[in-house]
Image (cartoon, rainbow, N blue to C red):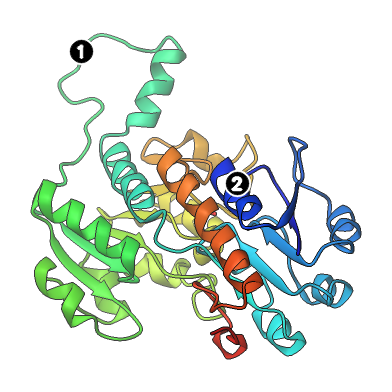
Amino acid sequence: MKVFVALNIPVKGIDHMRQAGLDVTVWDQDRPMTPEELIRKVQDFDALLSMGMYKIDNAFLNKCKHLKIISQFSVGYDNIDIAEATRLGIPIGNAPNAMTDATADVAFGLMMAVSRKMFYMHKTIQAGKWGPFKPQANLGKELKNKTLGIFGLGRIGEAVAQRCRGAYQMEVLYCNRSPKPDVAAPLDATLVDFETLLSQSDIISVHCALNSTTRGLFNKTAFDQMKPSAIFINTARGSIHNEPDLIQALRDNTIWGAGLDVTDPEPMKSDNPLLTMENVAILPHIGSATVEARTEMSRLAAENIIQFAKGNKIPNLINVSLQTGK
Ligand code: DGY
């Protein structure tokens, strides 16, 4: 089986596939492929190991229907038209779990960075503006005993809540499609509806998937219901919040601060007003960017293709109706 890897991922997964007898080619340029390049390239391959920045949409899939499997180097798969892939009989795998701690650390770090204006303070020093001590300047907020609102109590949401409980004894509220009593119990977390999450939380941290229900969910209507002292954190997908509404909410003091590891679009432009705001911290989608997480993501994404090639069950299959292995 011939596998095309569409960006240079950590070597573990590539070695793993080669050791399993697969014929692996890696896109070795230091830039993503254009859509045309990707379509042209995969014509000679049976399997694609893809990444979130590639649009695996209806048009792509219909030009690449020969693909026997696509495995994604990420947990998120909002870049893939799953319904069309399923219709065409192309199994789609992903790489969950690997980035749970790495992403939770970024969410937790952003909370601290925002609450103490850390990124902004760093910039003031760079700008030569570290002035004399003023007792009432540069004041942030403490996180201890605050109320954390988790939107999406999956693995990453749980890991964020654990950090906030352990470090700051936060009370945890969560909003989820279904109750998660086993996860919630050790966190002493309370299931609430969306409106309650918005109105009661001091910090809201977003950990859901991007889909038609969550796209643009954190908009003006949502920000208007949050506390003026609240901090909004998003490490999931940028399109879950409405960026112009977020900017306005911060300008109007509707909410106090925001920490984002994901933006819409990505990359964010360098003149984005969020980058100059005092109570804002932005990162360039580095949630999973640790050696440990990216190495494991590489292994997991490869494993889907290896097991499929062996006629076994695909370990992390999204369109489960296509599971055919033993
Ligand atoms: C994921 O795995 O979905 C992360 O966002 C990295 O892209």
For the point 28% across and 47% down, the residue is 108
In front of the other: label 2 or label 1? Answer: 2
Numbered marks: total: 2
Quadrant where the N terminus sits is: bottom right
Q: Please state the horizontal and vertical placement of residue 325, each as a whole percent of the image.
A: 58, 83
Between marks 2 and 1, how big is the CA–CA gap? 56 Å
Q: Please state the horizontal and vertical placement of residue 324, each as a whole percent of the image.
A: 60, 87
| Residue 288 visible in rendering | no
Give the left or right position of residue 246, taking residue 161 as reference: right
For the point 72% across and 62% down, the residue is 48
Helix, strand or loop at label 1? It is loop
Give the left or right position of residue 273, taking residue 192 as reference: right
Residue on which the image places disc 2: 15
For the point 71% across and 79% down, the residue is 90
Disc 2 within 8 angstroms of ligand 1 (CB): no
Helix, strand or loop at label 2? It is helix
For the point 32% across and 51% down, the residue is 101
Quadrant of res 267: top right
Q: Is residue 301 above or below residue 9?
A: below
Quadrant of res 147: bottom left
Query: Which label number is shown at residue 282?
Result: none
Q: Residues within 10 Å of mark 1 (few under 14, many from 20)?
A: few
Give the left or right position of residue 167, taking residue 316 as reference: left
Q: Please state the horizontal and vertical placement of residue 323, each as a whole percent of the image.
A: 58, 85
Q: Kindly identify the amino acid type of the residue bearing the numbered disc 1.
A: Phe
Q: Is residue 39 above or below residue 65?
A: above
Q: Kindly identify the amino acid type of the residue bearing the numbered disc 2.
A: Asp
Residue on which the image places disc 1: 133
Give the left or right position of residue 33, taking residue 325 as reference: right
Disc 1 within 8 angstroms of ligand 1 (CB): no
